[in-house]
Image (cartoon, rainbow, N blue to C red):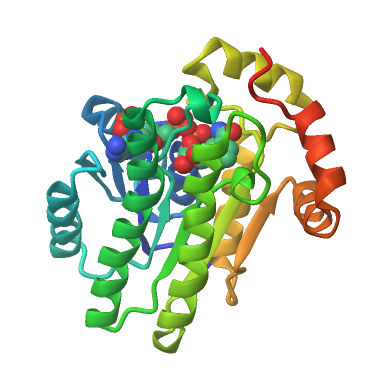
């Protein structure tokens, strides 16, 4: 973890769930923080608590990441305040799970905008700064196991996350020459507020509970990967889902059957 201590880390989606857990985990290791999300009061509350516990520097930026001008301003401000930002963990996102025919155009647009377009925009703004400043930064993008294996009623969400995986695969090759590394995290279900938006999602979480991860333990794995010299391309958790996505590629018809009957998001 020595590679985390004393360095500056930017975390999006830091007001809740995985991002919040990553922020606490980094601070515990002595990392300094720049926390982004929309809810300013939440961020301030978290920043004050982190400072009280770990005495690290914490900046907060309340920003809607889907507002491209506001995001550009936020990243410029962050680099003006902390010219060397060593890495970033992009966690902001959400899922709305309905069958493809039932989603409105606006539902689809919003999900793709925060999950995919904002992830690309955050990545672009950070890597531009790192290239300009000669910083070998580390970018971690939280996608999802849904980006590898789609389930019924997750079409748009899954597409929004597989878009991140493809984008990261390309970006990784483009920036490797500058020592910039890119990791994608693909978690299965994690016990966060992600599931609190709809009753059907709570019911789904209960069905897959034995498979569900705690945000703190996932955050620890993310931070461990950040602290390693050679950062992994991907972190697929729980590991069984890594094997599942490989088997799915080999046996898609059997895979469809298993997914449809055991991981059907539309069945409350
Ligand atoms: N929980 C799971 O089972 C699971 C599984 C796989 C992948 N993921 C992915 O993990 C990431 C984090 O999810 P989570 O489980 O931690 O959910 P969460 O507890 O609901 O946290 C979502 C975070 O995203 C931020 N956010 C959402 N829209 C935003 C916007 N327009 N601008 C800025 N920030 C925004 C929220 O902050 P504000 O509301 O304050 O803006 C919040 O901090 C998401 O990308 C999700 O797709 C989650």
Position of residue 246 measured from the top left corner of the image (x, y, whole percent): 79, 58
Is residue 114 visible in the rendered image? The answer is yes
Q: Specify the quadrant that holds the N terminus.
A: bottom right
Total count of labels: 0
Nearer to me, 103 or 224 = 103
> Where 7 sits versus 254, above or below?
below
Viewer-closest of 175 and 79:
175
Residue extending farthest front: 101
Q: Residue at x 81, y 27 (%)?
A: 261
* Residue 44 screen position, x and y as percent: 25, 32
Q: Residue at x 31, y 30 (%)?
A: 106
Quarter of the render that holds ligand 1: top left
Question: Measured along the vertical axis of the image, is residue 154 above or below residue 239?
Answer: above
Q: Residue at x 58, y 19 (%)?
A: 201
Residue 188 or residue 179, whichever sits in front: 188
Locate residue 216, reporting x and y percent: 59, 38
Residue 154 in the image, given as x and y percentages of width and height: 57, 34
| Horizontal relation, residue 119 to residue 39: left or right | right
């Amino acid at each position: 973890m020595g590679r985390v201590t004393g360095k500056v880390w930017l975390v999006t989606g830091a007001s809740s769930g995985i991002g919040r857990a990553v922020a606490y985990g980094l601070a515990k290791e002595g990392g300094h923080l720049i926390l982004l999300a929309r809810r300013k009061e939440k961020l301030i509350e978290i920043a004050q608590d982190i400072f009280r516990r770990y005495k690290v520097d914490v900046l907060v930026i309340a920003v809607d990441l889907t507002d491209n001008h506001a995001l550009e301003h936020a990243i410029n401000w962050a680099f003006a305040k902390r010219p060397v930002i060593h890495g970033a963990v992009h966690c902001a996102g959400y899922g709305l799970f309905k069958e493809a025919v039932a989603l409105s155009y606006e539902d689809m647009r919003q999900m793709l905008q925060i999950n995919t377009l904002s992830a690309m925009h955050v990545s672009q703004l950070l890597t531009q700064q790192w290239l300009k400043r000669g910083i070998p930064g580390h970018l971690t993008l939280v996608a999802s196991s849904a980006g590898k294996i789609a389930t019924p009623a997750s079409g748009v969400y899954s597409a929004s996350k597989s878009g991140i995986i493809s984008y990261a695969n390309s970006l990784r090759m483009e920036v490797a020459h500058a020592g910039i590394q890119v990791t994608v995290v693909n978690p299965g279900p994690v016990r966060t507020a992600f599931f609190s938006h709809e009753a059907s999602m709570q019911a789904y979480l209960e069905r897959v509970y034995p498979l569900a991860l705690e945000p703190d333990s996932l955050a620890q794995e993310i931070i461990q990967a950040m602290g390693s010299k050679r950062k992994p391309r991907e972190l697929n958790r729980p590991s069984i889902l890594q094997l599942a996505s490989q088997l799915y590629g080999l046996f898609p018809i059997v895979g469809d059957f298993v997914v449809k009957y055991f991981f059907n998001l539309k069945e409350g």
